[in-house]
Amino acid sequence: MKRNPSFNSRSKIWLRAILLGATVFSVQLRAEDPAPTAAAMAASLSARLQDGSAVVRLKLDVRQPTAGGATALQLQIKSRRTKAATELVYQVLWPKERKGESFLVRKTPGNAATGSIFLLPDTLRPLTAAQLKEGIFGSDLSYEDLVENFYAWEHQTLVGTESIGRVACQILESKPSKGDHSGYTSVRSWIDPKKMVPMRIEKFVGAQMARRLETTRVAEDDTDKPVPASLSVQRPGKDSVTELEGSKSRHGVIFTDADFTPEGLKTLTTPK
């Protein structure tokens, strides 16, 4: 993927979905520090996901090579992430004909994710449990992927090492308990132990891999911490590739509770 010339190496970039359940803050490790245990690594990653309030700009591209289809969107993401809850609002900024299309997704510990979607010109409806497993804006990343914090799951194990590109990674396997309400049975993360950034994430249902997320670029966010700046998402057997690239982020943003309500989806504003 060609690098956008407006994103230089000094840009403050933060990419939030995943990562779903898939993107995290990092902490620098000194050479003399001992290698973290699985539990310590997962706890650190989990804690850094709970970064409070933020607003993010994101480019989302979906390509279907065989069918020749393609979708490109510019998005604004409002997020509040704490131990008590994860709340996200995604709103389309571009193209003009889809500007204002939005959705809200929320998850609290011990409960399943919930959400609502606003479709132009004036349709507001809840997202069902089945719809929350579908891709956002027709992409390969689901609503549930965005709010699921698998680093907080009960079972965490280091299962090996492998290099991704030139980065020697530790492989962390996460498995949920019944109270985690996940559609996945396990998740494997290839963690760069120096930057504590996930370079690859694979999500499984039984023995079948359901999604793979690859970090294609690492950069610093607005708090000067290394994070995944660009991601590629694929589903095995599906003729679709989703690429996400963050342009800028801002933490410590002041929101109101109304910003994270279904009715709030009808208003497209940029927090100050």
Image: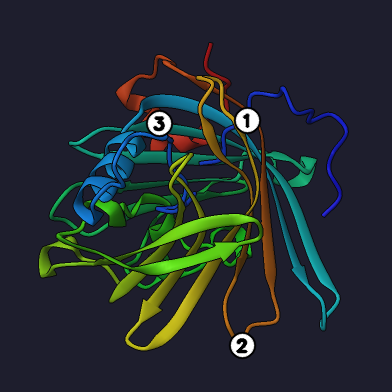
Looking at the image, residue 157 sits to the left or right of residue 197; the answer is: left
Rounded to the nearest whole Å, what is the CA distance between mark 1 and mark 3?
24 Å
Report crowding for label 2: few under 14, some 14 to 19, many 20 or more residues within 10 A (C-alpha).
Answer: few
Residue 257 shows in the view: yes
* x and y percentages locating residue 81 in the rendered image: 32, 34
Q: Residue at x 32, y 36 (%)?
A: 33
Q: Residue 237 shows which numbered tag? A: 2
**Relative to 247, 249 lies left or right:** left
Quarter of the figure with residue 165:
bottom right
Q: Nearer the viewer, mark 1 or mark 2?
A: 1
- Residue at position x 24%, y 56% from top? 38
Q: Of helix, strand and loop, which one carries label 1? A: loop
Of the two numbered discs 1 and 3 on the same chain, state the one appearing first in sequence: 1
Tell me, for residue 13, which label it has, or none: 1
Frontmost of labels 2 and 3 is: 3
Q: Amino acid at mark 2?
A: Gly
Up-down relation of residue 261 to residue 269 (above or below): below
- Amino acid bearing label 1: Ile
In primary-sequence order, the first of circles 2 and 3 is 3
Residue 86 at what x, y percent from top left? 30, 41
Mark 2 vs mark 3, CA separation in Å: 41 Å
Which residue, given by chain and number where applicable, does mark 3 sit on? 30
Q: Nearer the viewer, residue 100 or 232?
A: 232
Residue 233, image quadrant:
bottom right
> Which residue is depicted at the point 38% across and 78% down?
204
Residue at figure coordinates x 20%, y 58% from the top left: 153
Farthest residue toward the top? 272
In which quadrant of the rendered image does the N terminus lie?
bottom right
- Numbered badge on residue 43: none
